[in-house]
Amino acid sequence: MVIELELITSRLTIRNLCPDDWKVIKEIWQDFDKSSYAQYDVPHSNNDIEIQKLVKNFSESNDFFLVMLSATKEVIGTVDLHNTGNGYDIGFCFLSKFQGNGYAKESCTALINLYAENGCKRFSAGTALKNTPSVKLLTALGFIRADTEQVTFYKDKMGNNIYFEGGKFELLI
């Protein structure tokens, strides 16, 4: 069962993802794939049918949220929170033209506070240690690096895994 959410902050509206949002998700993923940080994340599909199926599945949970500018309702990014059994793992992705304005921090803070008010005391996140903007955001949110791990999402021309150092971050409320 999906619990409808519309969370308002000083500048943003955060709401559940719905199946009709697939085109904006495709736009966000295509924008992200142009980033130098894309090499540190799971590859995204550009196939419309695959994206529609994924977004439909995402929208059937309480885990995925769209972030919009309240004034214009323009979608600027996503935040997701996945139940890990002992807390929630948080992820985020914002269109590059909106990065650096505090929107990710504002939306993540609002969702973390909402989940904490409802009993969640532990949050986690993972990112490449070379993804400086994500590391800075997690630190600004109060996360601490708890561990590191070798992560791979891609292979080189010879079929060998390409590894990078990933950070495991935690926030205890």
Image: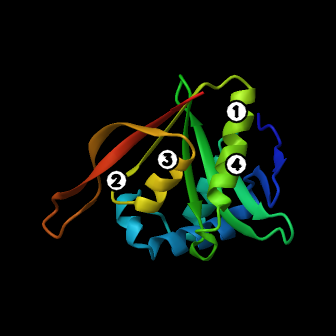
Residue 139 pos. (x, y %): 49, 47
Give the mark nearest the N terminus, 1 or 3. 1
For the point 59% across and 69% down, the residue is 99
For the point 76% across and 33% down, the residue is 1
Crowdedness near tag 1: few (<14), some (14–19) or many (≥20) residues, C-alpha within 10 Å: some
The image quarter in which residue 39 lies: bottom left
Give the alpha-carbon distance from disc 1 to disc 2, as whole Å. Answer: 26 Å
Of discs 1 and 3, which sits in the foreground? 3
Give the alpha-carbon distance from disc 3 to disc 4, as whole Å. Answer: 29 Å
Under tag 2, what secondary structure?
loop
For the point 77% across and 38% down, the residue is 2
Give the alpha-carbon distance from disc 2 to disc 3, as whole Å. Answer: 12 Å
| Residue 141 visible in the displayed image | yes
Figure quadrant of the C terminus:
top right
Crowdedness near tag 3: few (<14), some (14–19) or many (≥20) residues, C-alpha within 10 Å: some
When the figure is inspected, residue 94 is found, relative to residue 54, above or below; the finding is below
- Which numbered marker is on residue 139? 3
Residue at which label 4 appears: 59
Q: Callout 1, which amino acid?
A: Tyr
Of discs 1 and 2, which sits in the foreground? 2
Q: Are marks 1 and 2 in contact (CB under 8 Å)?
A: no
Give the mark nearest the N terminus, 2 or 4. 4
State the residue in front, 136 or 35: 136
Residue that lies at the very extreme toward the right in this rendered image:
71
Give the mark nearest the N terminus, 3 or 4. 4
Q: Are marks 4 and 1 in contact (CB under 8 Å)?
A: no
Residue at which label 2 appears: 129
State the residue in front, 125 or 18: 125
For the point 76% across and 63% down, the residue is 68
Give the mark nearest the N terminus, 2 or 3. 2
Give the alpha-carbon distance from disc 1 to disc 3, as whole Å. Answer: 19 Å
Residue 74 pos. (x, y %): 78, 71
